[in-house]
Image: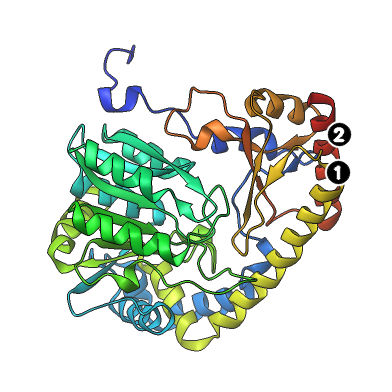
């Protein structure tokens, strides 16, 4: 059957994730991949999860294998709320929580509930390709606001809000941003919240990396400063526990929660109950903070090693961020260099990265930037891969 005339308008302009496509090459065993965003496998608490799974199936098999409620497994919801109040000072009497099937679904539900076709979404430029594609599937109009060392440019943000009356949502990853690794300053966070309140728009604060700080001072989340309900907070267990369990959560004003629940019922009824019970048991019986600290030390070492190798092998006219946490470094080449073409040549040399255009609101325009990930490669592969890239950059530039 020919489906060419049956595909919906909302999907015609959405292309496959460049990262997922690159995975097809980067997954080969002889390729050194800096392209993914995967957590280090050695950070997974495999033995604990194995024991927990057996205990659950011995003691609560019906609960684990039966349908659950759309809002999420009640014990886990309370554990997350308690932890977020303690760690991030998030949660007021007007807030509620829903457990979702990964951060991607959290963004999708937010878009489903808030956006009509043609509504505007302000995104950091660059920003996470997965959420950009989510907003595109709802036929939202994307407005990119450039990133500075302090985070989203507040002057451009206000001009964009002032000049475009269709904007409903600001999407931000303020801590160890994907792809740039930049952490927004306290001033930027406060300014973003003030502008959201002034222009009556919502903020989706995506914070999958916030607990992976390995240097510098912690900065309060935007949600912790929110007294008006403008901020929807998106947290995740993917980078601090296990991505395969597909567990994340939205904390937001009760005024919008009801529609989030209805939206989830229409999507997948409820999040995997077994996965929720695994995380709940782990939070109750084990020390997740100790596990996260182990991840921090892994990423600290690999980030410092990669930066040291870049300092040694990269040409001096190439600049890059120096993150204080998370798993990404953003590289900026001289103007006029196309990182997409550079990536094709790098793959021939068995090294993979993600070109910058994948993270832009206009994915067709060439970009002189690219993203590196340091979380999964061994020391030997980091040094070998960065040396190969350095040689390629020296030839190209």
Mark 2 = which residue? 391
Q: Is residue 8 above or below residue 51?
A: above
Q: Is residue 192 above or below residue 78?
A: above
Residue 61 appears in the picture as rendered: yes
Residue at x-position 28% and y-position 12%: 5
Callouts 2 and 1 close, C-beta under 8 Å: yes
Mark 1 neighbour class, 10 Å CA radius: few under 14, some 14 to 19, many 20 or more: some
- Nearer-the-camera pick, 102 or 46: 102
Residue 100 appears in the picture as rendered: no
SS class, disc 2: helix
- Residue 125: x and y in percent read 46, 41
Mark 1 = which residue? 313
Q: How has the structure been colored for display?
A: rainbow
- Residue 156: x and y in percent read 37, 42
Q: Is residue 381 above or below residue 18?
A: below
Quadrant of the snapshot with the N terminus: top left
Q: Earlier in the sequence, mark 2 or mark 1?
A: 1
Q: Is residue 9 above or below residue 322?
A: above
**How far is mark 2 from mark 1, CA to CA?**
7 Å
- Residue 314: x and y in percent read 81, 41
Could you tell whether 348 is left or right of 160 in the image? right
Q: Which mark is residue 227?
A: none
Taking the view exactly as shown, the residue that stands out farthest to the bottom is 285
Could you tell whether 234 is left or right of 240 in the image? left
Could you tell whether 260 is left or right of 309 in the image? left
- Nearer-the-camera pick, 250 or 87: 87
Residue at x-position 63% and y-position 77%: 293
- Nearer-the-camera pick, 129 or 330: 330
SS class, disc 1: helix
Residue at x-position 47% and y-position 30%: 16
- Residue 232: x and y in percent read 28, 61
């Amino acid at each position: 059957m020919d489906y060419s005339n049956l595909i919906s308008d909302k999907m015609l302009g959405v292309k496959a994730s460049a990262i997922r496509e690159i995975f097809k090459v980067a997954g080969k065993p002889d390729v050194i991949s800096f392209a993914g965003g995967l957590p280090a496998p050695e950070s997974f608490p495999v033995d604990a999860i194995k024991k927990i799974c057996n205990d659950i199936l011995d003691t609560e098999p019906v609960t684990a294998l039966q349908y659950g409620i759309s809002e999420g497994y009640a014990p886990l919801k309370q554990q997350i709320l308690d932890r977020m109040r303690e760690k991030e000072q998030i949660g007021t009497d007007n807030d509620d929580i829903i457990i979702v099937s990964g951060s991607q679904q959290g963004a999708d539900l937010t878009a489903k509930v808030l956006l009509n076709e043609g509504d505007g979404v302000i995104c950091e430029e660059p920003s996470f390709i997965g959420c950009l594609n989510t907003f595109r599937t709802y036929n939202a109009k994307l407005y990119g606001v450039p990133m500075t060392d302090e985070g989203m440019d507040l002057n451009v943000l206000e001009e964009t809000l002032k000049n475009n009356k269709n904007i409903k949502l600001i999407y931000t990853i303020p801590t160890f941003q994907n792809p740039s690794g930049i952490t927004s300053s306290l001033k930027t966070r406060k300014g973003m919240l003030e502008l959201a309140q002034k222009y009556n728009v919502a903020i989706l604060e995506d914070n999958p990396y916030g607990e992976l700080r390995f240097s510098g001072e912690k900065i309060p989340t935007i949600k912790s400063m929110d007294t008006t309900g403008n901020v929807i907070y998106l947290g995740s267990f993917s980078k601090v526990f296990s991505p395969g369990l597909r567990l994340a959560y939205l904390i937001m004003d009760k005024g919008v929660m009801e529609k989030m629940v209805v939206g989830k019922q229409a999507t997948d009824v409820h999040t995997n109950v077994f996965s929720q019970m695994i995380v709940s048991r782990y939070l109750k019986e084990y020390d997740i903070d100790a596990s996260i600290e182990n991840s921090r030390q892994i990423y600290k070492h690999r980030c410092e090693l990669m930066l040291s190798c870049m300092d040694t092998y990269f040409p001096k006219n190439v600049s890059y961020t120096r993150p204080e946490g998370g798993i990404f470094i953003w590289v900026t080449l001289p103007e006029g260099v196309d990182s997409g073409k550079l990536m094709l040549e790098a793959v021939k040399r068995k090294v993979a990265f993600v070109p910058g255009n994948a993270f832009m609101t206009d994915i067709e325009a060439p970009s002189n930037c690219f993203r590196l990930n340091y979380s999964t490669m061994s020391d030997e592969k980091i040094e070998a891969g960065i040396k190969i890239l350095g040689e390629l950059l020296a030839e190209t530039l």
